[in-house]
Image: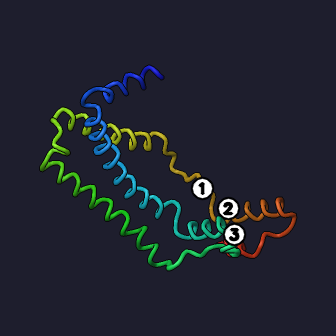
Amino acid sequence: TCSIFYVCGLPYCTRMGNELLDTVDHYVVAYFLLLGVALEAGLFRVNFGWRRLAVSVKRATFGNPATPDGRTVSPELFWQFCIAVTVPVMSLFLFAYMLQADLQTAYGGYPGWVQGIGAFGLSLVLVSVPTGAVLNWNGKSELPTMKEESHNKVLEGRAVCGNEVASGNADVAD
């Protein structure tokens, strides 16, 4: 394994190493990050949901000196709009804008072969991630339902505190 990483890192030690790093970073990291953010916002809406986020934030901040009853996510409609619309739309817009700019003018004025390495790296991650998702998807969520999660937290709270869970967690059950 170390020898593979050694060989993969050697091109970055050449005279064109910095240009290669910049191009790979641009194509693989920037493009893929923008796509990942858009996909994550969609998956958040479908799998995690707003109610679970609100409860998780309240639980995570419960008992803090600044928020003894837990923090409430507000304004609720604003954040729901951001997660459902603003995040995916702006991420996909930036992705399309960068792609259009790179198709018109080569990124950074680097030679075509460096651009090709960057584009090849992007194609590798664009193929490998969906392939891995399809191969590992079993059709069921690993998250417990809100009711199961609420019940487990109540039991954990009794075990830790030796009594009923504080009132800040009472609004968890659906």
Query: What secondary structure is marked by label 3?
Result: loop
Q: What's the distance in space between the residues labelled 2 and 3, CA to CA?
A: 22 Å
What element does badge 2 sit on?
A: helix
The residue shown at (19%, 45%) is 107
First of labels 1, 3 by sequence position: 3
The picture places residue 172, in percent across and down from the top left corner, at 67, 71
Residue drawn at (77%, 72%) of the image: 166
What residue sits right under mark 2 in the picture? Answer: 149
Residue 135 pos. (x, y %): 45, 39
Percent x, y for residue 90?
Answer: 31, 64
Q: Which mark is residue 143?
A: 1
Q: Residue furthest left?
A: 104
Picture residue at 37% right of the left edge, 58% below the top: 38
Distance from disc 2 to disc 1, alpha carbons, whole Å, reads 9 Å
What amino acid type should be assigned to the residue bearing mark 1? Leu
First of labels 2, 1 by sequence position: 1
Classify residue 63 by image quadrant: bottom right
In the image, taking residue 122 as reference, residue 138 lies left or right, namely right
Q: Decide: marks 2, 1 in contact (CB < 8 A)? A: yes
Which residue was labeled with disc 3? 64
